[in-house]
Amino acid sequence: MGKQANPRKVKDNEALAIARTLRTSPRKLNLVARLIRGCKVGEALRRLSFDKHRMALEVKKVLQSAVANAENNHQLDVDRLVVAEASVGRAFVMRRYHARARGRGAPVEKPFSNLRMVVREEDRKPEARNQKSETRSRKSEKKKKTENRKKDV
């Protein structure tokens, strides 16, 4: 008779971690999140460890939390995890005033951001990779043929 559990917000092969009210603008946070989108987790952690941005440490914490959620809560294989999504959103803006000359005040905005990170367990098979390379080679062959036809004319 208790309360029903919330439905999962992500798929069965994914894990989620969210950081709210990070003290930086979404634009600056997105610069860091952009570095790791689509990367394997090990590579993403390496990139964040050596990144010069101040928020790289916070993004790294969120990524580590997502990996821990995947391992402990959803029993996913850590070695096959990929950063599927790293989305940045706007939280709120603190508005302050800074004293200026002749009794005036200048507005100062201090933005906050949210970060949502989803890691996915990739199940790539060697056959799928070969199919992709075959289609690429076919496309390049077609392109070469059309270029040769253009040269002949």
Image: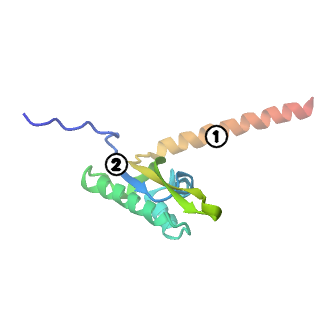
Corner quadrant of residue 102: bottom right
- Label 1 Cα neighbours within 10 Å, binned few <14 / some 14-19 / many ≥20: few
| Amino acid residing under circle 2 | Ala
Q: Above or below — where is 24 with respect to 88?
A: below
Query: In the image, what residue occupies the spot 60% across and 58% down?
Result: 104
Where is residue 107 shown, x and y percent of the image?
Answer: 57, 55
Q: Relative to the observer, which residue lies in front, 19 or 152?
A: 19
Of pointers 2 and 1, the one earlier in the residue sequence: 2
Q: Are marks 2 and 1 in contact (CB under 8 Å)?
A: no
Secondary structure beneath dot 2 equals strand
Q: Residue at x 59, y 43 (%)?
A: 133
Disc marking residue 15? 2
Q: Residue at x 39, y 58 (%)?
A: 62
Type of amino acid at the residue the image marks with label 1: Arg
Q: Which residue is mark 1?
A: 136
Q: Position of residue 68 (x, y in %)?
A: 31, 58
Helix, strand, or loop for circle 1?
Answer: helix
Residue located farthest toward the left when viewing the structure as drawn: 1
Q: In what quadrant of the picture does the N terminus appear?
A: top left
Task: Name the quadrant of the C terminus.
Answer: top right
